[in-house]
Image (cartoon, grey):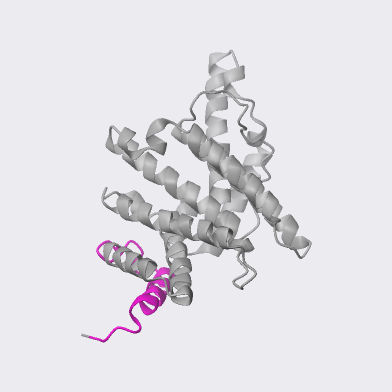
């Protein structure tokens, strides 16, 4: 809770340090070695394993989100295997789908750090391999996560939008280091990257319509503004009028919510986005 509070206040450094302490404490208690609860027959031990697994999974999620958003090394190396197309045909629940995304994101982060250590970018082949894994997770998730029309309750809608934001954010962070910004850049990579940014912004606007406190969570605000600035810069450079119009719609939609109010880092991003969109328009 303290980690999330610090992040919601824009204090990335303190929250990252506090999270590291929580991870080390969990490892000292052996929580990271908890067996699969489904393999335990004793009821009491199984319930204890469920609690411990939930704690460790939460730490993996928090660690992965910090790594994705702040471009910092992960404190956890996830040894869990990534689901493949040959896995069980059952649909993944919301929590399992998100967990598979974060496991994948953890492995993406470590691969990117290895490439960075070698002074190189992650090869396009590796990027495409991770992209395929994310696509598998998306297509194997329960129907209401894939298709908005399958949602039957407000909770279904919330899960749908959150999963979409998580999925888009993982892909944006996967492709971000591959963006060279020059004429040698693969146009397919660029367009896929920008499409994921557009998707994240559209999802957040739809999420705002649900009027929930979760809209103000640091991760949603952070990834949304990151995507908005990326798309805004690309729209200016490439002079894409459709993206400029889309961003203005996003700007006006978020203006009514102001989830980032009183946080300097997001206020600055807001001002920068405003400059991108309205710098050449006459003042009224």
- Res 16 seen here: no
Question: Which of the 4 image quadrants contains residue 34?
Answer: top right
Q: How many marks?
A: 0
Q: Which residue: 62% across, 66% down?
A: 185
Question: Is any part of residue 13 visible from this angle?
Answer: yes
Is residue 193 depicted above or below 95 in this figure? below
**Outermost residue to the left:** 284
Q: Residue furthest top?
A: 41
Q: Position of residue 64 (x, y in %)?
A: 57, 49
On-image quarter of the C terminus: bottom left
| Location of residue 86 in the rendering, given as x and y in whole percent from the top left corner | 63, 27
Q: Is residue 172 above or below residue 37?
A: below
Residue nearer the viewer, 196 or 23: 196
**Residue 276: x percent and y percent?**
40, 77
Q: Can you give x and y, in whole percent of width and height, for residue 272 in the image?
A: 41, 76
| Residue name at image x 41 percent, y 59 percent | 221
Does residue 165 appear to the left or right of 192 in the view shown? Answer: left
Q: Is residue 28 magenta?
A: no
Front residue of 201 and 60: 201
Residue 86, compared with residue 173, is above or below; it is: above
Residue name at image x 76 percent, y 65 percent: 119
The range drawn in magenta is 254-283
Image side of residue 109 versus residue 52, left or right: right
Residue under the point 48% across and 27% down: 91
């Amino acid at each position: 809770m303290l980690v999330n509070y610090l992040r919601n206040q824009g204090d990335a450094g303190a929250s990252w340090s506090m999270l590291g302490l929580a991870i080390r404490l969990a490892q000292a208690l052996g929580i990271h070695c908890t067996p699969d609860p489904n393999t335990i027959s004793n009821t009491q031990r199984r319930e204890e394993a469920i609690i411990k697994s939930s704690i460790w999974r939460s730490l993996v999620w928090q660690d992965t989100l910090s790594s994705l958003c702040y471009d910092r090394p992960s404190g956890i190396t996830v040894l869990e295997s990534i689901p493949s197309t040959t896995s069980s045909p059952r649909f993944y629940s919301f929590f399992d789908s998100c967990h598979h995304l974060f496991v994948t994101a953890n492995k993406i982060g470590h691969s990117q750090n290895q490439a960075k250590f070698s002074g190189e970018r992650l090869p396009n082949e590796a990027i495409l391999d991770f992209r395929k894994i994310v696509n598998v997770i998306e297509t194997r998730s329960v129907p209401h996560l894939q298709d908005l029309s399958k949602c039957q309750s407000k909770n279904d809608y919330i899960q749908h939008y959150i999963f979409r934001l998580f999925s888009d954010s993982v892909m944006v962070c996967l492709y971000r280091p591959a963006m060279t910004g020059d004429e040698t850049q693969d146009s397919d990579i660029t367009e896929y990257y920008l499409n994921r940014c557009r998707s994240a912004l559209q999802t957040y606007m739809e999420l705002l319509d649900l009027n929930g406190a979760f809209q103000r969570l640091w991760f949603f605000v952070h990834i949304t503004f990151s995507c908005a600035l990326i798309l805004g810069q690309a729209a200016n450079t490439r002079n894409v009028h459709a993206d400029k119009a889309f961003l203005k719609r996003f700007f006006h939609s978020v203006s009514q919510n102001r989830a980032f109010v009183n946080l300097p880092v997001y206020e600055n991003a807001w001002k920068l986005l405003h400059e991108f969109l309205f710098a050449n328009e006459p003042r009224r």
